[in-house]
Each structure stands twice: as C-alpha cells, then as structure tokens.
Image (cartoon, helix red, strand yellow):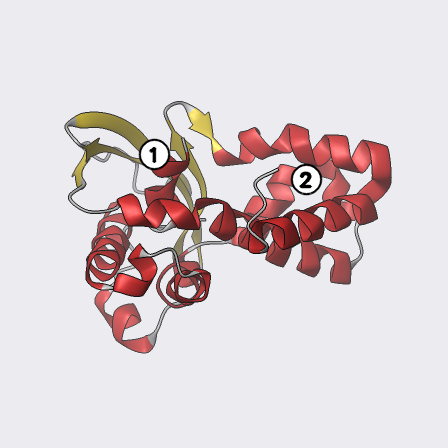
C-alpha cells in the first residue's frame, strides 16, 4: 500500500506552487488540474536522483512547491478529526495539520525510489457545470498492474482544490479517522498532537515501529 499511496500524495492532497509551475496549471478545471500536476510531479521525480533516494528534505520541498498550492490539507485534517477539530485551539489545529502532513511525507518517502515507469490513464470525467464537489478517476499502471486512484476536489474562489484521495477503495480521510479519534478519546487533542509529533520523530530516526 505504501508504494501505491505514493503517487496520490505527490499529485495532490494531499495548497502552493512555484510561480513557473503555477502558470502552467489550470486550476479552473478539476480533471485538467490533476493531469497537469501529476505529470509535473512524475517528471521531476524521474529526473531527481535525491528524491529517488528518499531524501526527505527534497521530497518536502517538492510537496511544498508543486503540490500544496492545489490542495486544501487543512480541510483534509479537519475532516479526519471530525467534530474534534472544533475542540482544538487555533495553534493546535495549525500544528496538527503540519505534523499530519509530515507524517504522510515521512511514511511514504521511501517509496519514491520505486517511481520509474508508471503511467496514468484517466477515466472519462463526468460532472455537471454547477457541481462544487467532484471526483477525478484514474488508473495507475504499475508494472502492468492496474491500480485505481481517485481524487476528490471541491471548488474554491481560487479554483479547484484536492482534499481526499482513494486508492484501491480506501479513502485517505476515512483511513485515518479511526486512528485520530482513538488518540483523542484516550488522550485528548493534545495527546493526538503528541502522538503525531513522536511518530514523526521515530520515522526521522529510522524507526518503523
């Protein structure tokens, strides 16, 4: 699953692009947006040896420059936390968003070395002109094996933004809801933040458990 989740994380979700790339991406059309970002990210991964080696600093730079401008990760985190989001202070919310983002980056950074010859096929995009929440569906061909990959986007005044992804029938938000809720129910919002922070420290230190 780690290898499969790599592409969606680096083609979305998962808010902020460099100027040159931003000019080349049309955020007014959800399917065009996904296709453009995905191609840009795959091209950079395949040409960057540091990213291929799993360099977390380079991966973080890639995410911040190429992907986050077209995602709403705060919305993602808020939906994962559900009603518990409103019990967190603004500072806690900010820290949880950042720690959650780093958790995803650190968890899947090693899989970047696996990105070589994957191709992406897009299913026909169907949406009404007045829709404000849509799904762009695609299939990633990984060594000849098809992997279904969907992106959920919503419309903002600045254009479309990705806030959830679906890999093999598992939506990212839903996948993390139970874990977050368990941490909060046992230790409160502060406990969740501590858990995420400690988990990132473990991953940074090369500990898998």
Q: Please tell me whether mark 1 sits on a helix, a strand or a loop.
A: strand
Q: Please tell me whether mark 2 sits on a helix, a strand or a loop.
A: helix
Residue 186, position as x, y percentages in the image = 84, 33
Q: Where's the C terminus, which quadrant?
A: top right
CA neighbours of label 2 inside 10 A, class few (<14), some (14 to 19), many (20+): many
Residue 160, position as x, y percentages in the image = 38, 53
- Mark 2 and mark 1 in contact? Answer it, CB < 8 Å: no
Instruction: Decide which of 188, 49 is in the foreground and name it.
Output: 49
Residue 52, position as x, y percentages in the image = 29, 56
Name the side, left or right, on which 49 lies relative to 78. left
For image coordinates 45% across by 66% down, the residue present is 57
Q: Earlier in the sequence, mark 2 or mark 1?
A: 2
Is residue 191 in sight in this rendering? Answer: yes
Q: Quadrant of residue 58?
A: bottom left
Judged from this view, the residue extending furthest toward the top is 169
Give the number of callouts.
2
The residue at which mark 2 appears reads as 81
Judged from this view, the residue extending furthest toward the front is 206
Instruction: Decide which of 85, 131 is in the foreground and name it.
Output: 85
Name the side, left or right, on which 203 lies relative to 13. right
For image coordinates 42% across by 67% down, the residue present is 61
Residue 7, position as x, y percentages in the image = 32, 44
Marker disc for residue 205 = none
The residue at which mark 1 appears reads as 150
Instruction: Decide which of 25, 11 is in the foreground and name it.
Output: 11
For image coordinates 25% across by 64% down, the residue present is 48
CA neighbours of label 1 inside 10 A, class few (<14), some (14 to 19), many (20+): many
State whether residue 56 is above or below residue 136.
below
For image coordinates 73% across by 32% down, the residue present is 181
């Amino acid at each position: 699953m780690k290898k499969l989740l790599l592409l969606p994380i680096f083609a979305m979700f998962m808010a902020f692009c460099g100027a040159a790339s931003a000019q080349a991406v049309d955020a007014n059309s959800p399917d065009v947006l996904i296709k453009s970002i995905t191609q840009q990210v795959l091209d950079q991964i395949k040409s960057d040896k540091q990213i291929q080696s799993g360099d977390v600093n380079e991966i973080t730079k890639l995410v911040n420059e190429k992907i986050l401008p077209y995602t709403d990760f705060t919305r993602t985190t808020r939906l994962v936390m559900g009603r518990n989001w409103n019990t967190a202070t603004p500072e806690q919310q900010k820290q949880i968003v950042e720690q959650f983002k780093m958790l995803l980056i650190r968890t899947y950074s090693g899989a970047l070395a696996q990105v070589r010859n994957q191709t992406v096929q897009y299913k026909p995009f169907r949406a009404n002109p007045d829709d404000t929440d849509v799904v762009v569906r695609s299939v990633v061909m990984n060594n000849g094996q098809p992997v279904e990959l969907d992106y959920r986007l919503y419309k903002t005044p600045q254009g479309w933004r990705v806030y959830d992804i679906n890999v093999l029938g598992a939506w990212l938000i839903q996948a993390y809801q139970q874990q977050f809720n368990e941490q909060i129910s046992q230790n409160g919002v502060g406990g969740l933040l501590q858990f995420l922070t400690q988990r990132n420290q473990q991953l940074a230190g090369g500990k898998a458990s």
